[in-house]
Amino acid sequence: MKSRNIAIMVFCLFAGTALLVTIYTRSKLAGQALESEWKSTIEDLCDNSTSAHIQSLRYTSYATQAAREDDTLNEQLFRALAYSELIHEQMCAKAAELFGGEYTSPHSEADISTTTEENLKRSISSARTRHNLTQGEAASRAIESGNRYVARILIWIDGSNRRHIELLERADNAGSKPGKDAGYLVCPKCGNIYHTASYDIYCPFCQTHYSDFKRF
């Protein structure tokens, strides 16, 4: 009787192990198939994540330099931009993982900061170059592949990046003149940025209410 029970237990153990191996194998194959299907989309998402990560580090460095110069307004702008880029990185990283990819933050050092005036001009040039190189191509590829979820995220980022250029140019043109309304608001869902003098009740990209915006 005991030997029969042992035989049943051994059978159950082997059967259970075989079932787990089958489930794992099918899961792995499904993941590989998904990654293969969305290969170019995942690459675009990871590229955007990497770019946003590097920009976030730069803006944080520039904010530190502005603080050294007691330039509060530009410190606020750079910190808001850094936060916006961080949100962009996280959005793309999560989307890449959702479609079977894997994103790893690059080991990158921030730019060596010079003066805030020079950092503003450097940021404008970098943001313009970045925008001109992409021109919404990644979003277009996502739309063509039928991935509207990723297309929406990339369109949000493209619109937000255009806003970055506008705010940087405004700050550069203002020079050392103090602003009437200090500070910036950042949508925590999509990274859209507003100057406190003008903002929407709801973010036009993701419909987040302004009460949830993070203020700098």
Image (tube, rainbow, N blue to C red):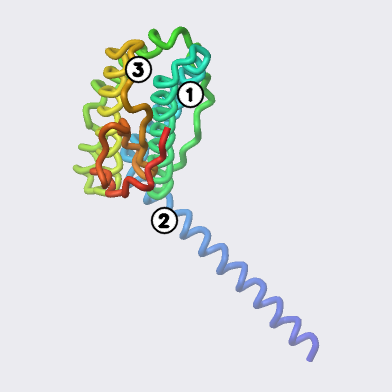
Disc with the residue nearer the chain's start (1 vs 3): 1
Label 3, secondary structure: give it: loop
Is 193 rendered above or below residue 95?
Answer: above
Q: Decide which of 198, 125 is in the foreground and name it.
A: 198
Q: Nearer the viewer, mark 2 or mark 1?
A: 1
Where residue 129 appears, as percent x and y from the top left, is: 28, 17
Three-letter code, disc 1: Thr
Q: Decide which of 212, 162 is in the foreground and name it.
A: 212
In the picture as drawn, the residue positioned furthest to the bottom comes out as 1
Q: Decide which of 37, 61 is in the foreground and name it.
A: 61
Disc with the residue nearer the chain's start (2 vs 1): 2
Where residue 204 appears, as percent x and y from the top left, is: 23, 43
Where residue 202 appears, as percent x and y from the top left, is: 26, 47
Which of the numbered marks, if any, corresponds to residue 30? 2
Tell me how far mark 2 sits from mark 1, CA to CA.
40 Å
Q: Decide which of 30, 216 is in the foreground and name it.
A: 216
Is 19 rendered above or below residue 147?
Answer: below
Q: Nearer the viewer, mark 2 or mark 3?
A: 3
In the picture as drawn, the residue positioned furthest to the front comes out as 180
Instruction: Decide if residue 208 is on the left or right side of residue 5.
Output: left
Write down the residue under mark 1: 60
Disc with the residue nearer the chain's start (2 vs 3): 2
Three-letter code, disc 3: Pro
